[in-house]
């Protein structure tokens, strides 16, 4: 049939179908059965979230904001769109520059963080940034030791134990602080810091990172994003487990970036300075060569002024010639004196010569002259053989000898002087011949040196001007917000993660609840049963939880004031409304399958009726699986229904008494090979009629109608047909059997009972029946209250 409903009406109809099909009682029942799992899901996910937060190292992030400035010719021309596009491209370019390995290599070099220090905790490790108890200087020869942990544990006094892996084998060595560790793979020097504590028993380790590892770490933890394109600002952020390290690195990146921008602006100046430095170096080398020449020239020639030396040489030659003349004259005078002394004549000496002679020689000449004169005077009075004359001759000989020695000595001295003057004169004459050519070469070199010196001064002046210009260059980029010390970690976000864990647990609980609700195919409560069946529901029997029942038991005798006993009384009363006729009545009790409690209901319902003074007989017709005798504490025996129907015994012989007055039962008897055929015999109908004559109520416990057809044969002979459905055991599809029986029209007084229903308050057990307050109910309420209290 074509559906002509408009879309909106179809949607409304689908919503109505959903709400009509939704069973709140069943949902509430599933919810109660699932509450512990739901709480477990929430507790589990929340606990996992807490454990994750507890044992995850917090990550801190420090950031700064830098304002960029760009110069554009399009801005001068007023091309706004071009300027905006260009500025966006330049901002993106600056971001990529900061994140590039080229720039981060500078950061890694300037940071000097190639050695990181850590301490082992119970579950995590912590980096000791700027507060390590030791520092390590290193020189790695084998690159495999880069990015590898070296463990350190402090030993006694001034020693420590170094542990590391070498070719897969653990190496443990003890060293002293300040002692250089030399191996073929590395050189290490471990020194203590002010943070060192000898009593510290923590285990530390350090890692020597390679340049590539440092750059990769910086690149992975660095984040550069545009803050505001219109304002031309970018945000530089760095994340690390140590908040001080994160802040310091952002500060360093900011500083190096500004330096880099200044370097870019000074590229031309730097090139000029580099050229000037090369020229200055070349000129300094040339000046040094000339200075070496002048130094060597001065050392060799002992002069730096050849013109003055030439004049001085001529003057020295004139002086030497004058001195040589005087010496020759003095030598001639000495030769004259020597001749006079040798001739023993009077010495005639120029008075000026005597003044120039040494004092001892002039005195000796005077003494000798005086003795000569005295002898000449004495000869006038004495002859030459006289004693006086001889004595004077003796004195003259001594004076002559002394004078001769002195004259020879002084003559040698004058001859030496004359020889020295001749040598000096020869040297001066030789130099005098070389001085003009040496002066020409020296002057030429001096002029070149002066030119180079002047050029050097110009170069240095130009370089100084460029350096002043470079020093005055400033970048227009500004740090608007410097890096600050983060106060809280960015992750893990404790509240968010724990809240997410709680929400995930809640969602899993809801999904679990919905799955269980949709998968729940068993009858849960009275209201659900009423919706499923088209027969009256006499009532509900609560689950008996005081003790575990391994077999059918007569519960109403043990606890006649329990809610279960009261529920059976209510069912008994409701049955009077269904079959109000006085006199004997027969009741069949059946179910779909075994285990739904039909025998339990039959035996206990019979006991309740017997307690009112009625004479009741419970007959076990389930000859395949008899259980009635177990409820009454009897035995199946050799006689029962099977023997009565096969006419091997009588009813009177098969009747058994129970502890309850007025309550009797007939067991199933020995199991026959053909139970169904026995129930089809006329003897069965005769047995039922005979029982109705002898008893007020006959309750027939029939086999499950869902398994065999025996029960249907019995139900036709009974006044009331009870169909037992067990809560949370009987499937919803079982009810179809009940409805099919009702639809045949053969069982007009068929009713149903919901057995073993959960009697916890709030469930569907209320059903409008008031059971009062009983000892069992009070105990249950206290247990439930304590359970809720302990749960939360």
Image (cartoon, rainbow, N blue to C red):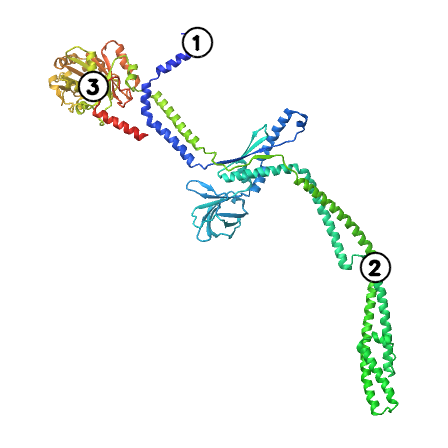
Q: Say whether residue 676 is visible.
A: no
Element at label 1 = loop
Q: Are marks 1 and 3 in contact (CB under 8 Å)?
A: no
Q: CA distance from mark 2 to mark 3?
A: 155 Å
Q: Secondary structure at mark 2?
A: helix
Q: Which residue is mark 2?
A: 310
Q: Quadrant of residue 710?
A: top left
Quadrant in which the N terminus is drawn: top left
Percent position of residue 304, x then y: 78, 57
Mark 1 packing: few (<14 Cα in 10 Å), some, or many (20+)? few
Nearer to us of marks 2 and 3 is 2
Q: Residue visible at 51% across and 47% down?
A: 135
Residue labelled with disc 3: 568
Q: Position of residue 223 (x, y in %)?
A: 54, 33
In the picture provided, is 546 more to the left or to the right than 452? Answer: left
Quarter of the image that includes the C terminus: top left
Residue shown at the point (48%, 38%) measured from the top left: 241
**Relative vertical location of residue 617 with respect to residue 124 in this rendering, above or below:** above
Q: Residue at x 12, y 14 (%)?
A: 694
Q: Residues within 10 Å of mark 3 (few under 14, many from 20)?
A: many
Q: Which residue is mark 1?
A: 6
Q: CA distance from mark 1 to mark 3?
A: 52 Å
Q: Position of residue 533 (x, y in %)?
A: 28, 14
Q: Earlier in the sequence, mark 2 or mark 1?
A: 1
Residue shown at the point (40%, 33%) measured from the top left = 48
- From the viewer's perspective, tell me whether residue 659 is left or right of residue 513: left
Q: Nearer the viewer, residue 259 or 115?
A: 259
């Amino acid at each position: 049939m074509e559906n002509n409903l408009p879309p909106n009406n179809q949607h409304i109809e689908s919503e109505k179908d959903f709400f009509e099909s939704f069973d709140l009682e069943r949902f509430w029942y599933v919810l109660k059965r699932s509450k512990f799992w739901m709480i477990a899901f929430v507790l589990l996910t929340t606990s996992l979230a807490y454990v994750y937060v507890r044992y995850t190292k917090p990550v801190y992030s420090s950031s700064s904001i830098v304002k960029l400035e760009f110069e554009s010719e399009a801005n001068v021309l007023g091309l706004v769109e071009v300027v905006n596009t260009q500025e966006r491209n330049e901002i993106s370019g600056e971001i990529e520059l900061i994140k590039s390995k080229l720039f981060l290599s500078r950061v890694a070099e300037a940071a000097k963080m190639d050695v990181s220090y850590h301490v082992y905790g119970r579950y995590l490790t912590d980096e000791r940034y700027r507060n390590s108890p030791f520092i390590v200087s290193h020189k790695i020869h084998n690159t495999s030791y880069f990015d590898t942990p070296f463990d350190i544990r402090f030993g006694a006094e001034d020693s420590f134990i170094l542990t590391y892996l070498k070719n897969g084998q653990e190496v443990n060595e003890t060293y002293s602080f300040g002692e250089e560790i030399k191996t073929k793979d590395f050189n290490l020097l471990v020194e203590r810091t002010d943070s060192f504590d000898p009593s510290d028993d923590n285990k530390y380790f350090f890692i020597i990172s390679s340049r590539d590892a440092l750059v990769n770490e910086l690149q992975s933890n660095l984040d550069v994003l545009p803050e505001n394109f219109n304002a031309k600002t970018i945000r530089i952020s760095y994340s690390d487990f140590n908040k001080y390290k994160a802040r310091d690195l952002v500060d360093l990146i900011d500083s190096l970036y500004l330096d880099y921008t200044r370097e870019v602006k000074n590229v031309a100046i730097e090139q000029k300075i580099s050229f000037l430095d090369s020229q200055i170096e070349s000129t300094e080398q040339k000046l040094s060569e000339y200075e070496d020449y002048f130094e060597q020239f001065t050392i060799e020639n002992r002069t730096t002024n050849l013109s003055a030396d030439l004049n001085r040489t001529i003057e020295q030659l004139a002086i030497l010639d004058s001195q040589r003349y005087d010496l020759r004259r003095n030598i001639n005078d000495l030769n004259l004196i020597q001749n006079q002394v040798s001739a023993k004549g009077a010495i005639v000496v120029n008075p000026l010569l005597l003044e120039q002679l040494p004092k001892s020689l002039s005195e000796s000449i005077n003494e000798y002259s005086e003795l000569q004169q005295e002898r000449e005077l004495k000869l006038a009075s004495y002859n030459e053989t006289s004693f006086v004359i001889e004595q004077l001759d003796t004195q003259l000989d001594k004076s002559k000898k002394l004078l001769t020695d002195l004259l020879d000595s002084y003559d040698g001295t004058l001859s030496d002087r004359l020889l020295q003057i001749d040598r000096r004169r020869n040297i001066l004459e030789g130099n005098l011949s070389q001085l003009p050519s040496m002066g020409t070469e020296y002057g030429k070199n001096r002029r070149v040196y002066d030119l180079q010196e002047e050029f050097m001064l110009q170069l240095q002046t130009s370089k100084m001007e460029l350096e002043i210009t470079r020093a005055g260059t400033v970048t227009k980029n500004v740090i608007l917000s410097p890096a600050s010390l983060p106060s809280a970690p960015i992750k893990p976000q404790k509240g968010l993660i724990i809240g997410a864990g709680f929400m995930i647990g809640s969602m899993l609980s809801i999904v679990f609840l919905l799955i269980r609700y949709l998968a729940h195919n068993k009858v849960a409560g009275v209201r659900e049963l009423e919706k499923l069946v088209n027969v009256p529901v006499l009532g509900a029997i609560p689950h008996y939880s005081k003790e575990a029942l391994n077999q059918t038991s007569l519960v109403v005798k043990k606890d006649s004031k329990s809610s279960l006993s009261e529920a059976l009384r209510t069912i008994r009363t409701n049955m009077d409304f269904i079959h109000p006729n006085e006199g004997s009545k027969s009741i069949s009790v059946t179910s779909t399958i075994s285990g739904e409690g039909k025998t339990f209901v039959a035996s206990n319902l019979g006991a309740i009726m017997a307690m009112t003074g009625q004479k009741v007989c419970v007959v076990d017709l389930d000859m395949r699986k008899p259980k009635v005798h177990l409820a009454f504490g009897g035995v199946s025996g050799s006689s029962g229904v099977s023997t009565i129907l096969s006419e091997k015994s009588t009813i009177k012989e098969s009747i058994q008494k129970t502890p309850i007055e007025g309550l009797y039962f007939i067991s199933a008897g020995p199991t026959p090979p053909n139970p169904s055929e026995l129930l089809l015999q006329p003897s069965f109908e005769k047995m039922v009629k005979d029982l109705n004559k002898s008893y007020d109520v006959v309750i027939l416990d029939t086999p499950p109608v869902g398994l065999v057809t025996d029960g249907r044969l019995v139900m036709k002979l009974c006044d009331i047909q009870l169909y037992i459905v067990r809560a949370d055991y009987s499937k919803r599809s079982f009810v179809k059997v009940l409805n099919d029986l009702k639809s045949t029209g053969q069982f007009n007084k068929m009713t149903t009972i919901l057995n073993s229903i959960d009697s916890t308050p709030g469930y569907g057990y209320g059903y409008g029946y008031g059971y009062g307050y009983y000892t069992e109910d009070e105990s249950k309420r206290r247990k439930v209250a304590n359970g809720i209290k302990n749960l939360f």
